[in-house]
Image (cartoon, rainbow, N blue to C red):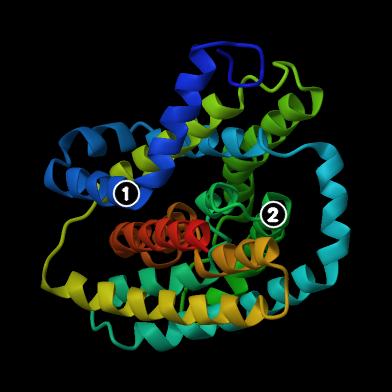
């Protein structure tokens, strides 16, 4: 018995495993976060060696493998909506973050909340858009566009919001190129050339979900909750709620698949990049709040995937 691509047994097993992971994604996200927070030693050790960026690269490679270069032409049909989304998020998300940060009394943690407002779209939001059946090309376009805007404008915006240290644009651009752009393009090349005759799709879907869970575990292992962190968590939850409403407004009147591709990148901002920005602009202590934010956005994204599938 074959699964339709000429490989009996093995590929049907992969398809079944992918379906299982997709069905219980939200539960697996909660478990991964709990394990990271309860047993942080290994995760912190790996993160100190750059494991988060490696995991991001794997996740983006798998995401790229679901898109062909021919699909990129689909961006043109949504170009106007994408430009509006990028302009709106660049202008309003820093304001939302500033308002939410007023709840935080610790200056360093307040800076971490502000950094979330100038971060680009979350890398995982592209993969989650694919898992939710949304238009991955649109989400990837928003990721690339927001990344470029972050590199160009994060420093000036943070200066207006009270930061006294400029963000290293060259370092940020190099990191994002290696961890985001190159893996995404590599996956797209493999999908476009169809080197495996479609046999890799279920396997790559499993790897995408697994790398997402590993990423959450790595981030959760950085949590060091104390009394002041709860205020930061509340502020970041309010910020996420406001960004979600903004994404929903931007997606009004669009087809269902495009709606998901607009909501997820708008609501989910890259916690890893935000942590780097926070450390540069406000000091290393400011990055601690972004571990909380990382858990929040990934749980939110998993919930959107579950709701989208049921719909």
Which x, y percent locates residue 199?
64, 19
In terms of image quadrants, where is residue 138? bottom right
Count all numbered tags in the image, as a single digit.
2
- Going from N to C along the chain, the mark reached first, 2 or 1, is 1
Q: Residue at x 64, y 55 (%)?
A: 134
Which x, y percent locates residue 261?
64, 61
Query: What numbered label is drawn on residue 135?
Result: 2
| 10 and 64: which is toward the camera | 10
Q: Residue at x 78, y 73 (%)?
A: 81
Classify 201 as above or below 266.
Answer: above
Q: State the SS at label 2.
A: loop
Q: State the SS at label 1.
A: helix
The N terminus sits in image quarter: top right
Task: Determine if residue 166 is in view.
Answer: yes
Q: Which residue is mark 1?
A: 29
Which x, y percent locates residue 91?
64, 81
In terms of image quadrants, where is residue 80? bottom right
| 133 and 235: which is toward the camera | 133
> Marks 2 and 1, how far apart in space?
23 Å
Which x, y percent locates residue 11?
53, 18
- Taking the image as shown, residue 174 lies to the left or right of residue 38, namely right
Q: Residue at x 12, y 46 (%)?
A: 38
């Amino acid at each position: 018995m074959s699964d339709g691509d000429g490989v009996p047994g093995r590929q049907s097993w992969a398809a079944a495993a992918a379906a299982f992971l997709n069905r219980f994604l939200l539960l697996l996200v909660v478990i991964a976060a709990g394990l990271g927070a309860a047993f942080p030693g290994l995760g912190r050790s790996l993160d100190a060696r750059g494991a988060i960026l490696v995991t991001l690269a794997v996740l983006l490679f798998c995401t790229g493998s679901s898109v062909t270069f021919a699909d990129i032409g689909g961006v043109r049909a949504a170009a106007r909506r994408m430009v509006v989304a990028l302009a709106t998020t660049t202008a309003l998300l820093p304001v939302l973050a500033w308002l939410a940060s007023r709840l935080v009394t610790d200056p360093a943690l307040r800076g971490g909340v502000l950094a979330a407002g100038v971060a680009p779209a979350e890398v995982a939001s592209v993969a989650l858009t694919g898992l939710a059946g949304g238009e991955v090309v649109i989400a990837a376009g928003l990721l690339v566009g927001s990344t470029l805007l972050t590199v160009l404008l994060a420093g000036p915006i943070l200066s207006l919001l009270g930061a006294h240290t400029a963000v290293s644009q060259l370092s940020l651009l190099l990191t994002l190129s290696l961890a985001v752009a190159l893996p995404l393009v590599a996956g797209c090349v493999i999908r476009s050339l169809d080197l495996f005759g479609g046999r890799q799709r279920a396997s790559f879907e499993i790897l995408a979900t697994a790398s997402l869970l590993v990423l959450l575990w790595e981030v959760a292992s950085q949590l060091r909750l104390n009394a002041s962190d709860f205020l930061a968590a509340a502020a970041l939850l309010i910020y996420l709620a406001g960004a979600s409403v903004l994404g929903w407004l931007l997606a009004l009147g669009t087809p269902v698949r495009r709606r998901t591709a607009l909501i997820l990148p708008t609501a989910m901002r890259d916690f890893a990049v935000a942590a780097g920005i926070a450390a540069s602009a406000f000091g290393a202590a400011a990055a601690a709040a972004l571990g909380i934010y990382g858990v929040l956005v990934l749980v939110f994204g998993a919930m959107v995937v579950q709701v989208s599938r049921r719909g």
